[in-house]
Image: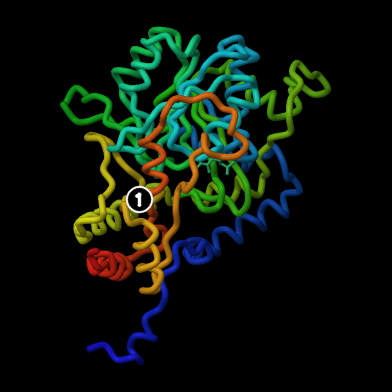
Amino acid sequence: MISDGEMSERQDIEFLNLRESNRMVEDALTAAAESVIRSGRYLGGEQTAAFEKELAISCGTAHTVGVSNGLDAIRLILRAYIELGRIRPGDGILIPANTYIASVLPATEFGLRPVLAEPDPATFGIDWQKALEILDSGKAGKISALMTVHLYGNPSWDSRIAAEMRSRGLLIIEDNAQAIGAAVEDSTDSDDNPVWRPTGGLGDAAAFSFYPTKNIGALGDAGAVACCDPELAATVRALANYGSDRRYHNIYRGYNCRLDEIQAAFLRVQLSRLEAIGRERRVMAAAYSRSISHPDVILPRKLPATRQVWHQYPILSPRRDELRNWLATNGIATDIHYAVPPHLQPCYKDLPHGPLPLTEKISNEIISLPIANADMSVVERVAEAINSFPLT
Ligand SMILES: *Cc1c(COP(=O)(O)O)cnc(C)c1O
């Protein structure tokens, strides 16, 4: 029997607490801020340059450009491809229907046609086979790119279909906002050891977000573009700086999408724990997957030979709202990513699309469990609460 006194001592479980997340690096963050303050250089300095180098190493690309946020990273990639003539206004771009709206907004901003494809239930990312079928059917008109979103930190990648699409001239763009540190096993080396390729370095270009809640978070807004094409990198860099390739010389009608030095300095601290964050989250996710067992709950999956970084730990339940209430009653906060898919948002009421029943079902059934600050005792309590969710 648990007495009332003991019950009230059980602390509520928060969904996410950034102060807690950053406590271990508080001193390093403070030192980073001080060094930037004292440097007198607040944009385009050595912190940004160093961060760009470190990020390029971590995702295995030749070039990275630090930018203002993840949405701008996607905007800059699409605008740069338009400037380079690789994508034309009016072209179709395959995008998973089951994504955050930031994956879609840049396409419509530039007059591209989002061609929304249903998700693969194993990843919640785009169903590559269905995307290929849409391309093959020719019904969606000219399609010049596919954007894959590694949702929840789960790699959404099909090497064979990506290669096939590239051979037909499509650009493969990664929305890697949620998956920094994730990877796919691509091949084996001469000793038959697996070779892992990080997400963000799989396609032609990738967008990163360092929104504070992401696995690697700034203390404010920040993002990056990664690619191996020097021309694309130079175009993105120019567009992000008023479209100027050198001082007072504007080759594009650009933007101001620069990364702050202070955020770059913070991000260097955060990036140093990339592996540790991924490892910790994998341990917690594995514990969730081992301990949760309920007939009304479906656990997340992943494709074979992929390394997940569990930005979210999402479960599905046809009794979603009831289950969330049950967990809340047990002092456990959860969240929904995402309750309304882009095509059902008021701003996209005129967006053409086919039936998307799977996307809509996911949006009605998905729940994110606490993982960012979770330890084993949190996992145990959450699993216990879910397992005791009364059957109807
Ligand atoms: C967070 C996020 C973005 C946008 O990043 P911001 O830095 O918030 O602009 C884009 N796509 C996905 C999938 C995201 O999760």
Which quadrant does the N terminus fall into? Answer: bottom left
**Ligand 1 under 8 Å from disc 1 Cβ:** no
Quadrant location of ligand 1? top right
Instruction: Using residue 283 as the reference point, say whether residue 244 is left or right of it.
Output: right
Instruction: Using residue 150 as the reference point, say whether residue 230 is left or right of it.
Output: right
In the depicted structure, whether residue 319 falls above or below residue 378: above
Instruction: Using residue 76 as the reference point, say whether residue 124 is left or right of it.
Output: left
Q: Quadrant of residue 190?
A: top left
Relative image position of residue 297 (x, y in whole percent) = 26, 54
Relative image position of residue 42 (x, y in whole percent) = 73, 45
Confirm whether residue 222 shows in the render.
yes
Q: Which residue is mark 1?
A: 314
In the depicted structure, whether residue 209 falls above or below residue 162: below
Disc 1 residue type (three-letter): Pro
Q: Nearer the viewer, residue 77 or 219?
A: 77
Q: Residue at x 35, y 68 (%)?
A: 326
Confirm whether residue 60 shows in the render.
no
Q: Nearer the viewer, residue 278 or 38?
A: 278
Count of numbered circles on the image:
1
Judged from the image, the secondary structure of the residue bearing numbered disc 1 is: strand
Relative image position of residue 111 (x, y in whole percent) = 63, 20
Q: Quadrant of residue 347?
A: top right
Which quadrant does the C terminus fall into? Answer: bottom left
Q: Residue furthest right?
A: 248
Q: Residue at x 46, y 36 (%)?
A: 176
Q: Residue furthest front?
A: 392
Q: Nearer the viewer, residue 181 or 24?
A: 181
In the depicted structure, whether residue 124 falls above or below residue 187: below
Relative image position of residue 346 (x, y in whole percent) = 60, 39
Q: Residue at x 56, y 27 (%)?
A: 351
In the depicted structure, whether residue 173 falls above or below residue 325: above
